[in-house]
Amino acid sequence: MSATHPIELLRFNTCGSVDDGKSTLIGRLLYDTKSLMEDQLEALERSADITGGGQINLANLTDGLRAEREQGITIDVAYRYFATPKRKFIVADTPGHVQYTRNMVTGASSANLSIVLVDARQGVIEQSRRHTYIASLLRIPHLVIAINKMDLVDWSEARFTEIRDEFERFLPLLDMKDVKFIPLSALNGDNVVELSKHSPWYPGPSLLGHLETIHIASDWNLQGFRLPVQWVNRPHNPRDPALHDFRGFSGQIAGGIVKRGQPIMVLPTGQRSRVKEIWTYDGAVAEAFCPQSITLVLADDLDVSRGDMIVGLDSLPGASTELQARVCWMHPRSLQRGKKYLLKHSTQTVQTVVTSLENRMNINSFAAEPEPTELVMNDIGEIRLKTAKPLVFDGYSTNRLTGAFILIEPATNATVGAGMLHPPTEPVKPEYNDFAI
């Protein structure tokens, strides 16, 4: 594969209720794609004694904690990497228990695709609806409903259709545009890597076939350049004259495309300049795009620091101290009006106060319950915030990277909530600064 056509990377997560087979499915993918080292296979065989019976348990490939293996549940988020000739994959195995919903949000936050597993015997339950809703809330572009354990219902096409129809009754409420239903048996490998002879009524593809071929190039926002500045790059190498006066601004592109010579603005100061050089790990380039990590050198010597955002002039973000957001609450101490937190957005952290609780989402009906007195752990609701200084942001529906934030409890430094910002009421004014370009 040439350097100009690198193999694409697909990030996906598995979710669903307890014992739906999420960890087993990932273990099957790793096992059948021959992505395991010899020492991993040996460890898998040794761990068989923990679960009893001497049978290899594929779930142990992701359930790394001893407590997880002993209880047969997933507690933490486990990340695994594997690759095929067509694509590279990073998969997050997320917990099924309702009390670990916050971990599911964490594992799915950067995913291109989410797999919601459903036990064919149990059908659609509350956790199925909850995780499908969270996938839509996080604006994950692609969704797979994997109806697992089909071998336990004799590969009944009628049962598969019944579960699919139940999902399709509420999916229109969630604005999910790309949904695929796949019947499978993770334990036996049916329809996971290869199509199964047990489901002649299912035309395909297999799960891996779908993961390898789904179009993800357009998942990233390529409209409106955004570079949250992570650090100011000053090498100061006296042995290299070229680096003596080098001053660049490093970070991961959070949206759009940047080209050499392009006019830019630094927010929140409003200073303007042009892009002089673009550096990547592989050297200088003429252009770069989301989600590459780069260092920008500007034509003018501007005062730029960590937390600032360098943006293109074609599509400006918003800037405000008054924010409205949807939040998933992750902490035993409830969220209440008037509480103060630290809000971490992109590369900056600001103080904030919760000014109102607008509503709480009823997972069963997808209806908004207005003005709750509090949000408790795993609740999802709308809130309003006021920050100590203006936040430069896009709506989460426009840009997942510049529209997301977390809330941190100052006293303990614990992450207590994950939020998605509503679009700004208006963009920043382009006449922020008359700096000549």
Image (tube, rainbow, N blue to C red):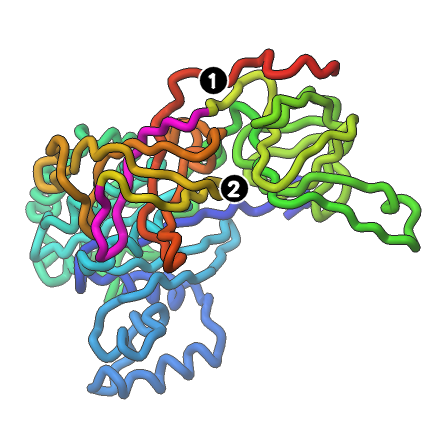
Judging depth in this view, the residue of 37 and 151 nearest the camera is 37
Residue 359, position in %: x, y?
Answer: 17, 33
Q: Amino acid at mark 1?
A: Pro
Q: Is residue 305 left or right of residue 21?
A: right
**Residue placed at 7% from the left, 43% from the top?**
162
In this orientation, does residue 210 appear?
no
Judging depth in this view, the residue of 331 and 396 nearest the camera is 331
Residue 5, quarter of the rendered image: top right
Residue 69, position in %: x, y?
Answer: 27, 77
Image quadrant where one finds the C terminus: top right
Residue 21, quarter of the rendered image: bottom left
Residue 329, position in %: x, y?
Answer: 26, 47
Residue 49, position in %: x, y?
Answer: 27, 88
Which residue is tagged 2?
348
Q: Which mark is residue 180?
A: none
Residue 330 is a magenta residue = yes
Whether 105 is drawn above or below 35: the answer is above
**Residue placed at 43% from the left, 62% from the top?**
80
Q: Is residue 366 left or right of residue 176?
A: left
Alpha carbon separation for disc pair 1 and 2 = 19 Å
Which residue is tagged 1?
427
Asked which secondary structure carries label 1, the reply is: loop
Specify start and end residues of the magenta stretch as a single range.
320-336
Residue 283 is a magenta residue = no
